[in-house]
Structure formats: C-alpha cells, structure tokens
Image (cartoon, rainbow, N blue to C red):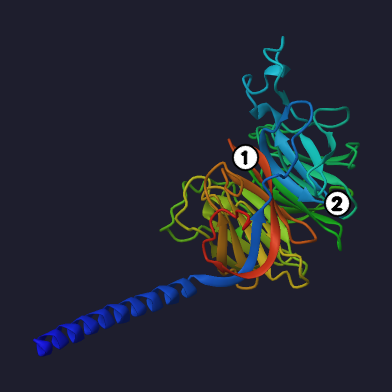
Amino acid sequence: MNRKRNLVVVSAFLAVFGVLAVSERALERSAAAQAKDMVQAPKFEVDPAFPKPLPNNWLLGQAIGVGVDAQDHIWIVHRQDSLGANEAAADQTPPTASCCRRAPPILEFDQAGNLLRHWGGPGQGYDWPNSNHGITIDHKGNVWIGGNVGSDGHVLKFTQDGKFIAQFGKPVPPNSPSWGSNHMENFGRVAKIFVDPKENEAYLADGYGNKRVAVIDADTGKMKRYWGAYGNKPDDTSTGTYDPDAPPIKQFRSPVHCAEMSMDGLVYVCDRPNDRIQVFKKDGTFVKETWVAKRTLGDGSTWDIAFSRDPQQKYLFLADGKNERVYIMLRDTLEILSTFGGGGRQPGQFFAVHSIAIDSKGNIFTTETYEGRRLQKFVYKGIANVPRDQGPAWPAK
C-alpha cells in the first residue's frame, strides 16, 4: 500500500512539474513575442480637454488644415459650409434654434486650448476659395491657405490679424487654357503650402486639379520651377484608378496632398491616392520613395507629414485619414516603427485624420475632415518602449 501511495505521489508531482514546465515555456514564448512587437519610438498621450469649448455656440466643420507658429500657437482652417442647417440652426433665417452657429474659417489657439483670434471668409481685394484647404504660418508670421474645389486656381496670404497681403494665381475654370500642371501663373486646387525660410520660396502641393509640386517666390508669387512624380514633367492625362498590383505610374495622382521640406533640404511629397511618399531635392531631383499601407484604395493613405523637432529630425509623422492612424517613421529610411490612433470618435481615435503639425515641445496636433470635424492634441511623453500598434493614445492615468 505504501509503495502504491508513493508511486501515486511521485506521478502527481511529475505531472504538475510537467504542466509548470509547459506553462513556463508558453510564458517565455509569449514574452518573446511581446518583446518582438515592441520598439523604441516617440510616445504620445491625447489631451482630452483640448481645445476648450468654443464661444458663441460655434461649431467646427470639416477641419482641413493645422499649423503651428513661432509662438507655439495652433492655427486651424475649417469649412463652414460643411455644417448643415440642422447643425447651424442659429445661422438660419429665421433661426430655428438658439444653437448652433458656424465658427469663422480660421481659428488660433494657445497651448492651453484657449481661442485667441478668429477671422476669414470673403473680403475686398481677394477671392476667398470655394473650398479652403490647408493652412501654413511662415517664418515671417504670414498665414497661407489654398483651395481645392472648382475654380480654385490660387493661394492667399494674410497677416495673423487677417489683413490681406497677396493673392497668387486667380480663379479659373478647370477646362480653360489658364489651367493645367504646366501653367506658369495659375494653380490647380492647391492642397497645402510650405515656405522655405532660407530661400523665401513657397512649395505648393498643387494638388487636387494639377499633379505637381510648384515652387514660387514667396513675396512676388513668380513661378520658379515645378515637377511631377520622379521629377518628370507633369502630365495631366488620366492615369485611371490606382491598382496596388500594377507597376508604379510615373506621374502623381490627384490629390498631391503635401510637400514638406526637412531642415536638410529634402522635400517629402504626399502622393495620396498612390499610397506613396516621394522624396526630392529642392531642384526637383528624385531621391527615393516608399509605399505606406499599399493596398489602401479610394482616398489613399499618405495625407500629411510633420517632422520631429530634434536637430536631425529623426522621426517623420504621417497622417493616414483612410486607415485612421498616425505612423511614426524613421525619416532617413522611411521605415515604419509604430502607429497610434484607430477609427472612432473618442479622444485619441480618428475619423478622417487630415492634417498634422508639431510644436517646439514635440506635441502633435491633428485635424479631421468629413464627419470627424475636430482638432486634437497629443502630448509628447518622450522616447519609450511602445507597441508597434499603440492603438488610441489614451492617457496612462
């Protein structure tokens, strides 16, 4: 009996030991898998209280541009007309309710989310775009906007108080001789502008009608040079629908959605419907390219770009309004390290994240178009060990 009892005890011990050993190996494999899915990269947390509520029962429409000025103030531009009668009931004639009203197109906020200035819309001496698009504050403090619908063949420049400075180009019918990717005076629905402080040149992502990067003198508007994909002469011939399995086409597709310059003089272009970023020298010489979420159809994946604020600008941040995330990439290799975001309407999620900007502290600001219609702030928390897919950047506490 004792021998049998001892045999049972030993067998039970060995069984438990075997289970523990298997469990340990499983935990080790799980830990190794988790470690493999982690990477050193910038970490962000959304500020769910930014910005503060707007005054006057104002609402934002499709928010299609964000920029940061030298004082770290945040500027956005949105489309008033995207708000319907039910949303802007107080704007109706007669008003159908006490709430709500369309906010002015251009709004400036401080770091705490307080509204500082607001202005914009049609005025004397210039043609307000049919559909304003993109906002940039240059090294002189001037505010630039473009337009992306109908006859929007021009860009506008204002002071920060909303005083008109200059209009470059003019509204032109899309089928007129004054339209096209090789025109020297007018543009074709400019998505965004970047101004090079060293050369005082404005780089136009031109855009929703044309298929080029156009470079103009930032004071006179004179065309200095332009180029298409791979540095080729742009061609407006229809390229058809994007096919991720076809060979890369040698032209941009519309819209060419951004043209951002790094401090070392490289121009990063968002060829949005082609799901690719192309990189050029200032003279239009092609350097390299990469695809992001290459099987994304329709709106495409490469919407807007911002660079980290370290001297080397080690990181590139790419907004993807179709897949609803921000990619954190190494700028030199264009390797994707991590992402944050995800589809939804809660803080830290996105619906059509359209534009992205970064302040001197490394905080990221995004705006959303379509039904997203908001501004969000993502606070920089330093370099950390983060998952390759971080999901919504919700605060840790």
Q: Which residue, given by chain and number where applicable, does mark 2 sit on?
A: 218
Q: Amino acid at mark 2?
A: Ala
Which mark is first along the chain, 1 or 2? 2
Q: Is residue 79 visible?
A: yes
Give the percent coordinates (x, y) of residue 314: 69, 71
Q: Secondary structure at mark 1?
A: loop
- Point out the frontmost of discs 2 and 1: 1
The alpha-carbon separation of the residues under discs 2 and 1 comes to 28 Å
Does residue 269 appear left or right of residue 17 in this picture?
A: right
Residue 188: image quadrant is top right
Q: Which residue is mark 1?
A: 369
Image quadrant where residue 191 sits: top right
Instruction: Spot the residue most to the bottom.
Output: 3
Return the residue nearer the eye: 229 or 344.
Answer: 344
Q: Which residue extends farthest left?
A: 1
Q: In this rendering, is residue 247 above or below 125?
A: below
Identify the residue at image location x=84%, y=45%: 143
Give the percent coordinates (x, y) of residue 218. 85, 51
Residue at coordinates 87% horizontally, 47% vertically from top-left?
Answer: 142
Residue 305: image location, x then y, percent: 66, 57
Amino acid at the residue labelled 1: Thr
